Image (cartoon, rainbow, N blue to C red):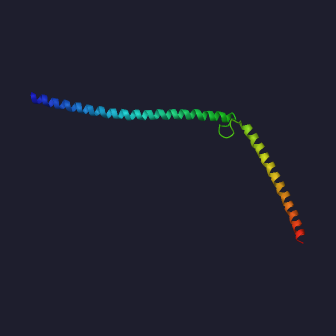
Amino acid sequence: NASNANDDLKAAKALVQETKDAINTKNQEITGDSESANKAQRDVLKAEEDLVKLTNEYQNMCAGISSSEGDEGLTLPDQISKAHSDANNADAKAKQAKMKIKHLNKTIKTVEKEVKKEEK
């Protein structure tokens, strides 16, 4: 009877150890799953923030409002008008520079003629 009780006790202890090991394994799985779930939640929050940002940019683009980069808050027609004005200004400056070069070339020729006369 005592040997049966010892065998039963050993079997019960083995079952308890197996159960403890199974509980530890499950706890590790739960911890891993919990970390994965937290990462997934962070990814979802980031994706939602990106969605809001991109939706706003899309709506602004459809409404003709530029993003905050570049020409601060100008509508598309305003940007086009500004670019046209800038192009006209650049063209006028280029024409002025060409006229100045032409004038300076004439001045150089005149001075060269005067220098030749003086050398004679």
Taking the image as shown, residue 18 lies to the left or right of residue 79, namely: left
Q: Quadrant of residue 30?
A: top left
Q: Quadrant of residue 7?
A: top left
Quadrant, the C terminus? bottom right
Taking the image as shown, residue 72 lies to the left or right of residue 112, namely: left
Residue at x 27%, y 34% (from the top left corner): 21
Q: Quadrant of residue 72?
A: top right
**Which is nearer the eye, 48 or 11?**
48
Q: Residue furthest left?
A: 1
Taking the image as shown, residue 33 lies to the left or right of residue 98, namely: left
Eyeballing the image, is 69 above or below 108? above
Residue 88 image point, x, y percent: 79, 46
Residue at x 13%, y 28% (from the top left corner): 5
Residue at x 63%, y 35% (from the top left corner): 57
**Which is nearer the eye, 114 or 2?**
114
Residue 47 image point, x, y percent: 53, 35
Residue at x 37%, y 33% (from the top left corner): 31
Number of numbered discs: 0
Taking the image as shown, residue 74 lies to the left or right of residue 38, namely: right
Eyeballing the image, is 105 above or below 85? below
